[in-house]
Structure formats: structure tokens, C-alpha cells
Image (tube, helix red, strand yellow):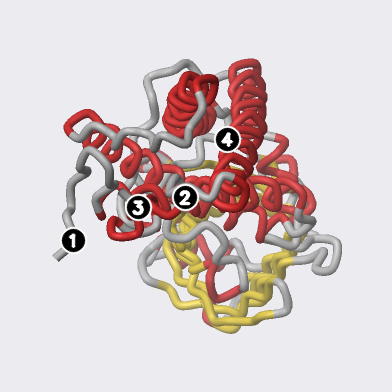
Amino acid sequence: MHARILGLAAFAACLAVPVYAAVALSDAAGSYTISPAGSSIRFTIGKAGGGGFDGAFGRFKGTIRIDNADVGRSKVDLTIYPESVGTGQGRIDAFLRSDAVFDSANNPEIQFRSTSVTRTGDTTAVVAGRLTARGKTFSEKFTAELDGLKSGTIKFHVTDKVLRSRYGMDVGTPIYSNVVDFDMTLTGRRG
Amino acid sequence: MQPLTNTATRYGWAMIILHWLIGIIFIGQFVLGFVMMRIDSQRMSFELIQLHKSFGVLLLGLVILRIAWRVGNAAPALPPSVGTVERKAAPLAHFALYALQVGLPLSGWALVSVSTLEIPTMPFNQFVMPDLPLAESDAAESFWSAAHWYLAYAGMALVALHILAAMRHHFLLRDSVLTRIITPSSARE
């Protein structure tokens, strides 16, 4: 991580501009399509008595647009297909896809549409937006950290805690935590 | 004030209450177990399974209490109306019922302990019940699942026999075998 930040710094320094991170981001300006190859959307739900269970979504799509003039006007759109959920345990996957949780037959998409992006550091930002799942929409805030930038490819590490009860997915609480920890790596390719 | 403990001819309140409480939970668990495995809604099925586990833990606790009470309190003697064969068969049937009251919750506990789903047991959402120290595997889960089912059917067969025997005593033999487990005072001496 530090190496990458230093890398960005070095890159910015070459351009001989004083606020290197800002330049790194403005250099990143443009539109990117999230590439499944370099991306992952993982989640963890804690369990009573310790431990938890992990899962990931195999299919998703989205775009990242970084505004050159005003980072705050940048935009992130992400669509996740809950049918593609995987935990390594077939019975749990079937349960998650069923009407007990995602009801993916009737709600094939989980959508995130950003409403604002706020810089919080040289390489970090808070992305606020509307998350829609099972027909319910709530505001969520994701923490994004720039994790790499090179020749038309941008990589973010995104984390968030989502309360699943709000989206009609409270089954199993309090045995399973209401808090879902998301850990995403989103790699965008320019164009 | 009616006695809490058993006497030579009467069941005390402690045994009477434990008998009916355990009886209702035992039969209720069979019904719940049957429904939770056949219901279409995965969500309802999950919730009912957790409820079944909660009542299973409660049942195990009550049965341990009942056995301890029984060990310290001899059951009253059978009335003279009870025949020789029944005099020998009844204790065996009662022993088998006790064995199943212990065996069913234990086999259920084993089942959730070896299950590869690793779903914690949290009786009535109050505390986390530790798993039994058994190795997890799909094969072990299938084994304990089958064992739990067979024990449940055996339990219900014995409960049916137990109820039929009680009816026979009450309506045909007209003795106090049923009434004395309802209240201590209804035991005809």
C-alpha cells in the first residue's frame, strides 16, 4: 500500500506539481468500466459465539467516472447479480438466493448509485449513494481507497458496513450479525 | 397444601408438572420437526429449525431435572387393578420413554454439531450453546439426521402406546392410573 502511494507520489513528482495526490487523481479523470477480471466483491457476516461466514458475488458490472474539475462530482454505478452469490457451501448459496434473503428470482439486481464523492485524504474518499436491494432503497456510505493507477486502469479498495435488516434480509439475526462487512476490489478500465 | 414429592400411592406436583410439560414439548417437537422440514418457505423453515433447537435444549434440561427427581423420589406403586403382564411391561415402556427423551435432544445436538452448515445453536436467542466435540462432515450429518428421524418415530410410537394405555386404564379398567398423574388428590387410595 505504501509502495503504491509512493509510486503515485513519484509519478506526480515527475509532473512537478506540488499537491501530488490531487494530481494523481486528476490524472485519473475519465470514465472506467469495472472489469470483473481484476475485481471482487466479498462479504463477511459475524456469527454468535465467534467466527462468521464469508461469501462473494461472482457477477457484477458498473462504471466509475472521475470528474477532472471536481472530484466531488465523480460518480460510481454498481450492479450486483445476487444469483451469483457463492459461499463454498451449496445449501447456504441456495438459501441466500431464495426468498429468505435475496429473492433473486424476483429481485435479480442489487444496485448502488452514488450521489456524492468526498475526498478524505490523498488517496481516500467517501462515496455516498443509494443502495437498492429487494425493492428497498437506503443511503449508504462506502469508503474508497485508491489502490493503483496505471495506463488506463484504476483500482479501488472499497469497504462498507451494511445493515441487512433494512433491506428485508434480517433472517437469522441475532445468530448471524445484522452487519454485513463488504470488502471490494474494483478495477476499472478506461473507456 | 398438596405434596411436592411422590408418596407410596400418589405422584407429587413436581412429577406431575414435569410429566405434562415434557409431554407437550415432546409431541410439539415432533410436529414442529415435521413441519419445518416440509415447509416451502426457506425463511420460515430456518426460523422453525431454530425454534426446534431451542425447545430441544429446554427439553434436555427438563428431562435431566425429571430424571434427578425420579431418582430421588420413587414412583408410586401401581394400583391392584394392574395385571401381571402390564406390571412388567409398564416400567420397560417408561424406561424406553425416558431413554428417548434423552436420546432425541442428544441426537439433535449431535446433528447440529456435525453439520457442515455450522449454524450456531442459540436457545431462544439467549446464549450460544456449544457444539458437541464431534467431527463435522456431510456423512456424519446424514447419519445423525437419520438417527434423529428414527428416534422421533420410535418416540411417537411409544407416546401413542402410552396414551392408549392411559385411556384403557381410565375408560375400561376405571382405575386411578391416569387421574393420579393429573392431581395428587385424584389418586384413589
Q: Alpha carbon of mark 2 to alpha carbon of mark 1: how far? A: 18 Å
Q: Secondary structure at mark 2?
A: loop
- Say which residue label 3 marks: B188
Q: CA distance from mark 2 to mark 3?
A: 11 Å
Specify the amino acid type for callout 3: Arg
Q: Which amino acid, by three-letter code, is at mark 2?
A: Leu
Badge 4: how crowded within 10 Å, few (<14), some, or many (20+)? some
Residue B117 image label:
4
Q: Residue beneath label 1, please?
A: B2
Q: Answer with left or right where residue B168 lies relative to residue A22.
A: right
In this rendering, position of residue B21 left or right of residue A26: left
Chain under callout 2:
B
Above or below, A102 relative to A90:
below
Residue B90 x/y as whole percent: 48, 27
Pinpoint the chain carrying mark 3.
Answer: B
Displayed quadrant of residue A63? bottom right
Dot 1 crowding, Cα within 10 Å, few <14, some 14–19, many 20+: few
Q: CA distance from mark 3 to mark 4?
A: 53 Å
Tag 2 residue: B178
Sequence-wise first label, 2 or 4 = 4
Q: CA distance from mark 3 to mark 1?
A: 15 Å
**Label 2 to label 4: alpha-carbon separation:** 44 Å
Q: Nearer the viewer, mark 3 or mark 1?
A: 3
> Chain letter of disc 4?
B
